Amino acid sequence: MLSLGNVLAEGTPNIDEAAGNTGATQSTTPPIVVSTWKMGLAANQAAWEILGNGGYALDAVEVGVRVPEGDPKGNSVGYGGLPDRDGRVTLDACIMDERYNCGSVMCIEQIMHPISVARLVMEKTPHIVLVGEGAQRFALANGFKKENLLTPESEKAWKEWLKTAQYKPIINIENQGYGYLYNKETDPMPGGVDNHDTIGMLAIDSQARMSGACTTSGLAFKMQGRVGDSPIIGAGLYVDPEVGAATATGVGEEVIRMVGAHLIVELMRQGHQPEQACKLAIERLIKRNPVHAKDIQVGFLALNKAGQAGAYALQPGFTYAVKSGQEEKLYTAKSIY
């Protein structure tokens, strides 16, 4: 196994361009996993333990995103995630396989690995989405345990925020700086490189099966009950075995408005390469709301069925990790601004 790389490269990775197929047969496309942000390096490595041994892409993406979900040092996914305005850590996640099966949980509390609950929703219920208390009850009935996900560090940050926060539903107040996190010198853009909220992962296995997963603790200090794009199939994640898959990160409200992940998959269906499809989606976002777009971050990541990956973002700083049998790197996506 390769050790975690420290290489930061510009542009799009040079992935094998051989076309795969959608059936469970030996693929001409080598296994590959891609995910958002630097935390994707460790997540990809866990996923590769499965992909590199001929395992199932769905298992790989679940195991992969469980890494940041269980990391108390991260403040944007799972354990250690920054809470909502009431000091409650609420989690969202979704998962999708190569047969259009999908599962999602929204606003679930006290459960360490919402991605695994989402998979059980997909596999054990006739539904796609479970929310809140119902999602928690389902998790507990399936062997999960209640755990306190609010770390002392995140609780301290929340209490600091409360000192100056205006507790009323001001649009996008969640993105106007988090005090202890926010540094105008190193992170000048709200929703920027140190103010993201999601890990999205896409993978192809040795049998050409494609799957994706997306999980988050949401925007810090959000209104109780707020859900972004991450657990919404078609917005934060979409997988189509005929074409490819896409995932999103950043301010979820803007991604939902344009059903971002599905849009990118359809652009790839029209013949656009992953990076170009992501760029076209970003341009559409700007066209719909040019003023607001300058003050937020949204990034898209796509993987086509040939194993080609690409990404694009509104603002500089969006990174994505790639792991295959040939490389393990962190790339910086191109951006509009």
Image (cartoon, rainbow, N blue to C red):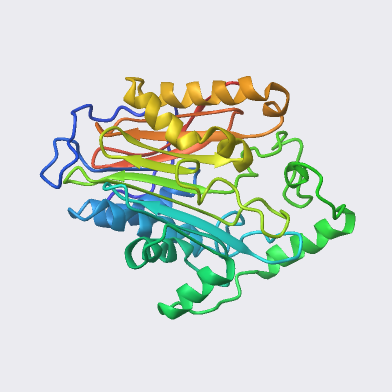
Relative to residue 334, is residue 2 drawn left or right? Answer: left
Q: Position of residue 28 (x, y in %)?
A: 14, 35
Relative to residue 251, is residue 125 drawn left or right? Answer: left
Q: Position of residue 60 (x, y in %)?
A: 31, 55
Closer to the camera in the image, 77 or 102? 102
Closer to the camera in the image, 50 or 100? 100
Residue shown at 80%/49% (left/top)?
Answer: 169
Q: Position of residue 54 (x, y in %)?
A: 17, 53
Among the 4 quarters of the image, the one containing residue 148:
bottom right
Residue shown at 68%/21% (left/top)?
Answer: 290
Relative to residue 124, is residue 40 drawn left or right? Answer: right
Residue shown at 67%/25% (left/top)?
Answer: 289
Q: Position of residue 101 (x, y in %)?
A: 32, 52
Relative to residue 86, is residue 26 drawn left or right? Answer: left
Image height of 149 relative to 161, above or below: below
- Quarter of the figure with the C terminus: top right
Q: Residue furthest left?
A: 26
